[in-house]
Amino acid sequence: MKVPRREWLVSLLAGCLTGKAAAEPPPASPCAGEADRITALIEELAQVKTQLAEAEARLEKLMRALSEQRGALQNRPSFDALKQGAESAADAPDRKPPVVRCAAITNSGKRCTRPALPGSRYCRQHQLAHQK
């Protein structure tokens, strides 16, 4: 039979006054297991906090590296600029002559989209039409 803690203290005091010893020691505290669990949780939280700090440091390092790469990409000339630079460096005789668009007006009232024949203002079809 377990005696509640309060009653045990009362019997201990009564025993001291009368010269008799208390029958049982106080029951084990129900909070003892809880204290161990809380201590374990605190240790686990400290470990998680350390891991989080390490992860934040790695994340910051990656963000810095990505930012530097983005800046390098933005400062690098685009493909079109490189292509134009290569074309301007090429010899002029290798280039094709510019394409001239046909000057004829179609039946729908729009300008013909075909290229004109070399030395002419018209494409093959409209060249024949303008000769008649």
Image (cartoon, rainbow, N blue to C red):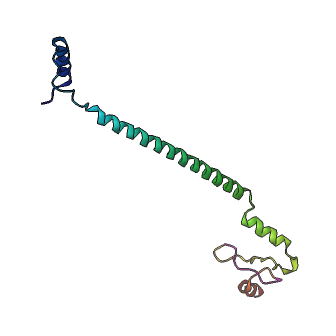
Q: Position of residue 25 (x, y in %)?
A: 21, 27
Q: Position of residue 83 (x, y in %)?
A: 76, 69
Q: In this image, 41 relative to 54: left or right?
A: left
Residue drawn at x 70%, y 54% is: 71
List the single residue furthest toward the left.
1
Q: Give the answer, above or below, for where 23 lies relative to 96.
A: above
Indicate whether residue 116 is drawn in magenta. Answer: yes
Q: Give the answer, above or below, for where 100 lies relative to 57.
A: below
Task: Return the residue nearer the eye: 34 or 83.
Answer: 34
Residue drawn at x 78%, y 77% is: 100
Q: Position of residue 78 (x, y in %)?
A: 73, 63
Indicate whether residue 66 is drawn in magenta. Answer: no
Task: Return the residue nearer the eye: 107 or 82.
Answer: 82
Residue drawn at x 65%, y 53% is: 65
Q: In this image, 33 relative to 44: left or right?
A: left
The quarter of the rendered structure image containing the N terminus is: top left
The quarter of the rendered structure image containing the C terminus is: bottom right
Q: Which residues are magenta?
A: 110-119
Task: Return the residue nearer the eye: 58 or 90.
Answer: 58
Asked where in the image residue 101 lies, by quadrant, the reply is bottom right
Q: Position of residue 118 (x, y in %)?
A: 81, 83
List the single residue furthest toward the front.
19
How many dots with numbers?
Answer: 0
Task: Return the residue nearer the eye: 39 or 78.
Answer: 39
Asked where in the image residue 116 lies, by quadrant, the reply is bottom right
Q: Give the answer, above or below, for where 123 lies relative to 111.
A: below
SS assignment for the magenta stretch, majority: loop
Asked where in the image residue 97 lies, by quadrant, the reply is bottom right
